[in-house]
């Protein structure tokens, strides 16, 4: 378990901060959009405020790894974080609300979160995956230097079935160069 972090990260356009209960309603609306939820493994559709509140509570107890609310002008636009899997690596996760797609916010937020994961925990590598029908995430991971690693089937709660997933890996050495430049 990972205690609730108090870390805040600022990027050029975004602030990443710990989640709180004020995020529950906007989270249920943004992440509950089927076009967002279907690209994640664990977000159901529909995504009720009660389910979002329960997840925020698990995050605050450290049961969901390290999670940041991604905000722009104090407005929640998504979440990003990672689950340490062992001393060597973590698994990355993120989503951005549909009204904010196409503006580079996912790349900006994920760059900051991955850099934090390497700096704070000293991981040797970070893994990530995206469903095969998610070209946006493929572009985000490619911009950040993630290299293709493999393929597997992963459950998708919103779709109610396993979905073909492409997996990626970013080693510490490669990250040092790739994450430096926006």
Image (tube, grey):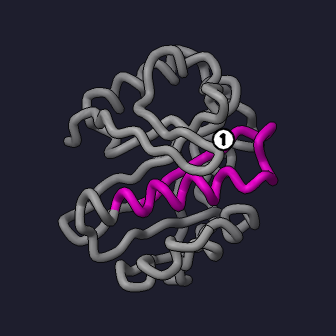
> Could you tell me which residue is drawn at 53 percent across and 61 percent down?
111
Q: Residue furthest front?
A: 12
In the figure, 160 relative to 55: above or below? below
Residue identifier under label 1: 37
Which one is in front, 127 or 162?
Answer: 127
In the figure, 164 relative to 38: above or below? below
Magenta residues, dominant SS class: helix
Q: Quadrant of the N terminus?
A: top left
Which one is in front, 24 or 11?
Answer: 11
The secondary structure type at the circle numbered 1 is: helix
Q: Quadrant of the C terminus?
A: bottom right
Residue 45 visible here = no
Task: Report whether 168 appears left or right of 163.
Answer: left
Location of residue 17 (image quadrant):
top left
Task: Report whether 180 appears left or right of 62.
Answer: right
In the figure, 67 relative to 11: above or below? above
Q: Position of residue 91 (x, y in %)?
A: 40, 61
Task: Report whether 173 appears left or right of 144.
Answer: left
For the magenta stretch, what is the residue range?
92-117
Q: Is residue 122 magenta?
A: no
Location of residue 64 (image quadrant):
top left
> Could you tell me which residue is drawn at 80 percent across and 37 percent down?
99
Residue 85 visible here = yes
Which one is in front, 88 or 70?
Answer: 70
> Could you tell me which residue is drawn at 67 percent across and 27 percent down?
46
Q: Position of residue 24 (x, y in %)?
A: 54, 19
Location of residue 43 (image quadrant):
top right
> Could you tell me which residue is drawn at 58 percent across and 57 percent down?
162
Q: Position of residue 33 (x, y in %)?
A: 74, 33
Which one is in front, 170 or 12?
Answer: 12
Q: Position of residue 136 (x, y in %)?
A: 74, 62
Q: Residues within 10 Å of mark 1 (few under 14, many from 20)?
A: many
């Amino acid at each position: 378990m990972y205690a609730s972090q108090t870390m805040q990260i600022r990027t050029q356009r975004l602030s990443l901060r710990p989640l709180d209960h004020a995020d529950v309603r906007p989270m249920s609306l943004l992440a509950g959009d089927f076009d967002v939820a279907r690209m994640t493994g664990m977000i159901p559709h529909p995504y009720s405020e009660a389910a979002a509140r329960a997840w925020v509570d698990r995050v605050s107890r450290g049961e969901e790894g390290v999670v940041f609310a991604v905000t722009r002008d104090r407005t929640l636009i998504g979440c990003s974080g990672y689950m340490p899997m062992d001393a060597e690596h973590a698994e990355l996760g993120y989503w951005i609300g549909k009204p904010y797609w196409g503006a580079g916010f996912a790349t900006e937020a994920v760059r900051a979160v991955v850099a934090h994961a390497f700096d704070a925990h000293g991981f040797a590598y970070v893994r990530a995956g995206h469903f095969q029908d998610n070209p946006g995430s493929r572009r985000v991971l490619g911009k950040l230097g993630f290299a293709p690693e493999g393929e597997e089937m992963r459950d998708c709660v919103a779709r109610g079935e396993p979905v073909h997933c492409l997996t990626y890996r970013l080693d510490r050495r490669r990250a040092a160069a790739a994450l430096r430049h926006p």
